[in-house]
Amino acid sequence: MSPPEYARAHRARFLAELKRLVRFPSVSAQSKHAGDVRACAEWLAGHLKGIGMQGVRVIATPRHPIVYAEWMGARGRPTVLIYGHYDVQPPDPLQEWTTPPFEPTVRNGYLYGRGACDDKGQIFCHVKALETFLRTTGRLPVNVKCLFEGEEEIGSPNLKPFIKRHARALAADAAVMSDTRMLGPDQPALTYSLRGGLGMELEVAGPRQDLHSGTFGGAVLNPLQALCEIVAGLHDREGRIAIPGFYDRVRRPDERERAYMRTVGPPDAKILADAGAERGWGEPGWSIYERTTVRPSLAVTGITGGYQGEGSKAVIPARATAKLNFRLVPDQEPRAIEALVRRHVARATPSTVRSRLVTHLRARPAEIDRGHPAVRAAAFAYRKGFRAAPVFLRSGGSIPVVNVFQEVLGIPTALMGFALPDDRIHAPNERFHLASFTRGIATCLAFLDEMAGVRPPRWREEKVAA
């Protein structure tokens, strides 16, 4: 049986196994799910071992484990590092899910569940391609190292130190990752640019305890009000970020690049339709696609303060918090932007309350050479798997490990994603198009085949220590 025939014959089993993976509530941000994250890692490692991968390990980190596997039997062939993450975002708000987030359900050609698309379904395209080769030909076309982490959704705090410690053992000719979007079901896309990220939490505190709003209203500045005023001042009326110096190092794309983006990128109406929004908003002079890719942004992703229950409560809260998510572009450095934010918030904080900023995430922007052999191999693979040539897109998202691979291992990453714009990533009712799952496996098969002819590996191989 040929590899494509094997993949078709076992399609139902592949889906059943993906459902099993999605059932793990591997929410890395919440300590109550630490055991679930570990159980998910153990299951994934067992599955990799079961399909014939070697050197499989679940490697502890200070928080959540890394799953490693390899197959190094393709002497003289390139080495491909397959990266993915098995952790997921919190499923809240639960009441907005049609079916429970960790009870994967198939409806209308989609698999619904938290992590079904981001990133368990996309990881599984690669895993099933590896199985298909190993079960039909007994070998892989290239050497493969798998690196699946459990902390991507919290900024990968332990991944860079791990990669630095094991740089020689993780040496490869290129990395491939499926954690990005296509333009549509029949239009694949290769991502060549990612924005950086900076995640911060702002707390404003006032009195030592909550106060009766009738007794103290008008006499004590409400920390929640002060917080809202500080947050409101982070943008100007036109949608530009109002932090002094914020745009000083923003790299402006030339007109040739902007023309290319207009040609291949989604129009404003399509992006708004995918978002379920009637009108756009943001920095004037740029299309929505440009605002979300080549321009920086700031989103307030959460505000907490005061009474949150049913009905009313006459209280002035003692403190209030806001979560801030910055997306950065070349040549913005996260630490430099962090310093600007801290300075601005300190100046904007009224003297009658106290503010404090905590940084949770820093990620640098990344750009990929569209002419690299691994990127060309991915483009060829899409033509085989989807029967369509991919377009090259910029992404507004942040994937910290792409920059880490560039800096530490000296390799590019082929960002060969299979998600659709309306797969509701990070939102209730997340889903993965089952046709994309099938085509994704075919694409991963073609990618490994095509990489076999690129060039021999540059590094001597070493084992990853537990």
Image (cartoon, rainbow, N blue to C red):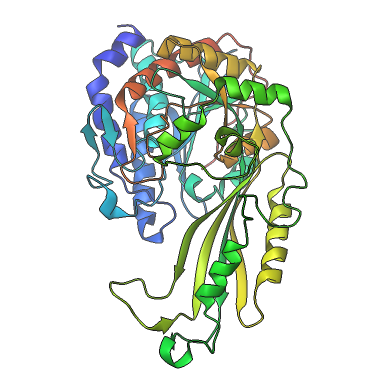
Q: Nearer the viewer, residue 187 or 55?
A: 187
| Furthest residue in direction top, as rendered | 1
| Furthest residue in direction bottom, as rendered | 215
Q: Nearer the viewer, residue 260 or 435?
A: 260
The image shows residue 187, relative to residue 162, as above or below, that is above
| Horizontal relation, residue 273 to residue 245: left or right | left
Quadrant containing the N terminus in the rendered view: top left
Where is residue 6 shown, x and y percent of the image?
A: 30, 13
| Horizontal relation, residue 53 to residue 144: left or right | left
Image-quadrant location for residue 391: top right
Identified at 38% across, 34% down, the residue is: 422
Please say whether residue 170 is visible from this viewpoint.
yes
Please say whether residue 78 is visible from this viewpoint.
no
Identified at 33% across, 55% down, the residue is: 93
The image shows residue 256, relative to residue 298, as above or below, that is above
Where is residue 143 shown, x and y percent of the image?
A: 53, 20
Q: Nearer the viewer, residue 434 or 410?
A: 434
Where is residue 163 shown, x and y percent of the image?
A: 61, 40
Identified at 56% across, 74% down, the residue is: 226
Image-quadrant location for residue 371: top right
Number of labelled discs?
A: 0
Where is residue 28 shown, x and y percent of the image?
A: 43, 52
| Horizontal relation, residue 361 to residue 209: left or right | right
The image shows residue 283, relative to residue 35, as above or below, that is above
